[in-house]
Amino acid sequence: MESIVSRLHVRLKNLGLSLLAWDSRGRRLGPLEPGSELCRMLHEAGGPALDVGCEAACQALSQRAASLAECPCGGCVMVAPVVRRRRALGVVSACFPALDSLEDGSLERLCVRLGLSWSEVSDQARIHVRHSRAQARDLLDAFQWILELQEAADLARSETETLSTNLANTYEELSLLYRISGSMKVSQAPEEFLRDVCKDLLEVMSISAAAAVVFAHASTGHEDVVVEAGALGLDEAQIKALAAEQVAHKFINNRPMVDNDFRAPSELGINDAVKNLIAAPMLTDKSLMGMIIGFNKLDGDFDSVDLKLISSIANQASVFLSNNRLYLELQDLLMGVLHALTASIDAKDPYTSGHSSRVAVLSKLIAERLGYEQDKVQQIYLTGLLHDIGKIGVPERVLCKPGRLTEEEYELVKAHPSIGAKILGGIRQLDEIVGGILTHHERPDGKGYPQGLAGEQVPQEGLIVGLADAFDAMTSDRTYRTALPLEGVIGEIRNLSGAQFDPRVVRTFLEMDVSGLMEELRRPTSELFPIPSIAELNR
């Protein structure tokens, strides 16, 4: 009503009409809006327009019909109800002093009764009084038409604003779902993915905090995961307990739930941190993996729009988690196969037992110190693990020979990088490690094998694995010699920097705690090198 009245006043003032309005309970909305200086003078002196208008307004509100009434000042009062979708919002009254009141003396008599100067009032009347009582019916029709027009305009404006707000909200929601879909990489850590989801949810849903809880999963080795965004004031243990004990059982038929009057049990110890919440389950094969929770709506209660949004987000997150778990299971299967394969190579010579695993770990540590991204570190780990896979094609009599190799036998050994590259070359998923396997015996000075590459021609993967391979070989017992002292090995590596080994790799390696690393490497292989999961490699 306030919006309609504020816009209606300007139109009615142009017609010389004063304006009054009441709500649906008959309460007056604001003071009289005079249509002229004459009306203002009469009203401030205690004119009867308010009383007459109020009585007519109550009648119009009860009958929901426009009507005319006479004012003691000789003017007319017009009233009309404001109805929207068959519901009365209130009533509006418009009044004017009539020309007839100047002729029959009624306006002059009113001035005497109110103690006003007739000369001043008559001067204003000659300027502002424009309508006669005979025109009242036409003015009432015009008044109703203006009121209906203003009501239609106000309704259209309100619906346009609502539509605009809904479109803006829908755009934000679609943008959020699009961003989530675009960021769903199966190799991404669930914590990272879910943290981004929670941050986006804060903004779009207008809440104080959001959290994602993923329950432990045995096949991937994942423990319970709790991530949150915003300001809630609860720790991970409290959020996990709230999710498991207060929310999970409220997912009826695996549907999202909302509680706009949340009451936490005292034993949870969260006091009044949570006023209301909304949650949606993350499912796989109708089994509960976890949930996404929104806490404390900033502008009222959670509604059906919020339920639809969080349900869509939880569905997207469920797809990600299911694919991520499948990816990790497949990766772990691959790692198991690769470790079994390298163990079979090492088993051909008891003196090299655990060599491939040690080279893999050393290569990984060096790559991390060099600042490589985690994906690259993982590739270098696999390169170290499989660097000797080509020894499958080298006869055991050569590999296990206790004495010095003949030139012909040495040529057979030198073929193992090429053989390994050929074996793995047909596996598309291992394309990125083939180069390192082929070049792990190449040298910066060009005296390596099998291609005799030099300088920057040798890829970093080959240089890193080459140093780790040489270090483990020198510090391990062989059929033809015992392990060399650590001090001598370090000195040899330092002396061969720039020739057999890359100076940058050497410098990085020697900055490590080599002595402590050796202590670790002397532990039993089964303890030091259990088969790692892909999740562990990504930590």
Image: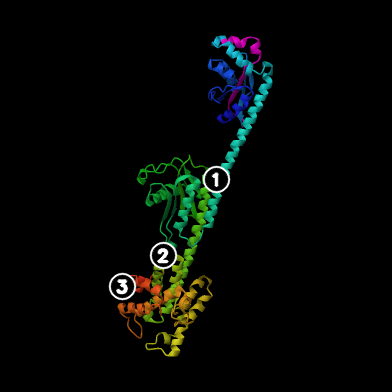
Q: Earlier in the sequence, mark 3 or mark 2?
A: 3
Q: Earlier in the sequence, mark 3 or mark 1?
A: 1
Quadrant of the rendered image containing residue 32:
top right
Q: Nearer the viewer, mark 3 or mark 2?
A: 3
Q: CA distance from mark 2 to mark 1?
A: 40 Å
Magenta-colored stretch includes residue 106: yes
Please tell me whether mark 1 sits on a helix, a strand or a loop.
helix
Amino acid bearing label 3: Ser
Q: Which residue is mark 1?
A: 169
Residue 328 spot, x, y in % from top left = 47, 64
Residue 70 in view of the camera = no
CB-based contact (under 8 Å), mark 3 and mark 1: no
Q: Which residue is mark 2?
A: 536
Q: CA distance from mark 3 to mark 1?
A: 60 Å
The segment highlighted magenta reads 85-111
Q: Considering only vertical position in the picture, is 236 above or below 55?
A: below
Q: Which residue is mark 3?
A: 515
Amino acid bearing label 2: Glu
Residue 310 spot, x, y in % from top left = 51, 48
